[in-house]
């Protein structure tokens, strides 16, 4: 019995160390507007609609890319649009802007990313809404190498999933699920609020949100208020 328990604990510890080492090995990571690094494979929801200079309704995601290595690295971005309704994504990275109009896989051009927290590279990604739809996209950073004028992905680095949903905190969304509520915590685990009817009114910052019903939790995710 003791041997079995020891083997289980050793396997659990080995898995934790392996995952930690993999996360620490990432040289290219995603950070928020406050300079905080997103955990690998985080899911972040954005819902704030605003009008841009062209009169379009857009949801912006203030995300940046940081090179944690001591030297400059060449990198690029892969994207997988998993859901796209009543709108499209506009992605600008390393001085190149392209629309991602439909569900599918996308790849940006590469370029140099300088090291250090003070030299974060902006990733300007926004959902341009043509209705009340939403978009879900998973992004992954790669180191890159230029070959014959084309950029080729090399080593995979940090990944993040972005959800653009203008109805995420709307009254209509809550009313359609009357028993839905939110438990909100800081990244340090401190309680911000329990059984909140919506996420409206939260101060700027990054939170851990548990969406739940009386019957139990529905989902847990990281939520950024820009």
Image (cartoon, rainbow, N blue to C red):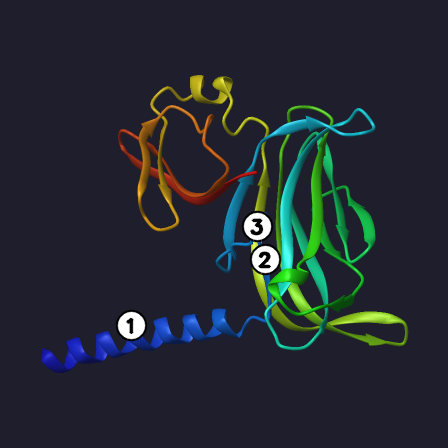
Quick one: label 3, few (<14), some, or many (20+) residues within 10 Å? some
Nearer to us: label 1 or label 2: 2
Q: Residue 165's image quarter? A: top right
Quick one: label 2, few (<14), some, or many (20+) residues within 10 Å? many
The disc, 1 or 3, on the residue closer to the chain's N-terminal end is 1
Looking at the image, is 224 positioned above or below residue 200? Answer: below
Q: Do the numbered discs 3 and 2 sit on residues whose CB atoms are within 8 Å?
A: yes
Q: Is residue 74 left or right of residue 24?
A: right
Q: Position of residue 200 (x, y in %)?
A: 47, 26
Q: CA distance from mark 3 to mark 2?
A: 7 Å
Q: Which residue is mark 3?
A: 32
Per the image, label 1 sits on a secondary structure element best described as: helix
The disc, 1 or 2, on the residue closer to the chain's N-terminal end is 1
The structure residue drawn at horizontal position 32% and vertical position 48%, both measured from the top left corner, is 189
Q: Which residue is mark 2?
A: 30
Q: Which residue is mark 1?
A: 12
Q: Position of residue 174 (x, y in %)?
A: 44, 21
The structure residue drawn at horizontal position 77% and vertical position 41%, both measured from the top left corner, is 101
The structure residue drawn at horizontal position 70% and vertical position 52%, both measured from the top left corner, is 123
Q: Residue furthest right?
A: 149
Per the image, label 2 sits on a secondary structure element best described as: strand
| Quadrant the N terminus occupies | bottom left
Q: Position of residue 77 (x, y in %)?
A: 70, 60
């Amino acid at each position: 019995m003791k041997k079995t328990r020891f083997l289980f604990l050793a396997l659990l510890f080995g898995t934790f160390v392996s995952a930690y080492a993999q996360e620490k090995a990432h040289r290219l990571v995603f950070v928020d507007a406050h300079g905080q690094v997103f955990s690998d494979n985080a899911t972040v929801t954005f819902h704030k609609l605003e009008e841009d200079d062209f009169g379009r309704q857009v949801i912006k995601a203030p995300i940046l890319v940081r090179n944690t290595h001591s030297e400059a690295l060449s990198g690029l971005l892969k994207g997988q649009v998993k859901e796209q309704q009543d709108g499209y994504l506009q992605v600008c990275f390393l001085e190149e802007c392209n629309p991602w109009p439909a569900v599918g896989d996308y790849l940006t051009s590469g370029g140099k990313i300088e090291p250090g927290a003070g030299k974060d590279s902006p990733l300007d990604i926004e959902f341009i809404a043509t209705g009340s739809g939403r978009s879900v996209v998973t992004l992954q950073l790669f180191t890159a190498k230029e070959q014959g004028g084309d950029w080729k992905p090399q080593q995979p680095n940090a990944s993040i999933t972005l959800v653009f949903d203008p109805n995420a905190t709307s009254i209509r969304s809550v009313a359609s699920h009357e028993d839905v509520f939110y438990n909100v915590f800081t990244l340090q685990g401190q309680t911000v609020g329990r059984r909140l009817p919506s996420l409206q009114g939260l101060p700027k910052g990054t939170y851990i949100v548990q969406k739940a019903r009386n019957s139990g939790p529905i989902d847990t995710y990281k939520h950024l208020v820009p």
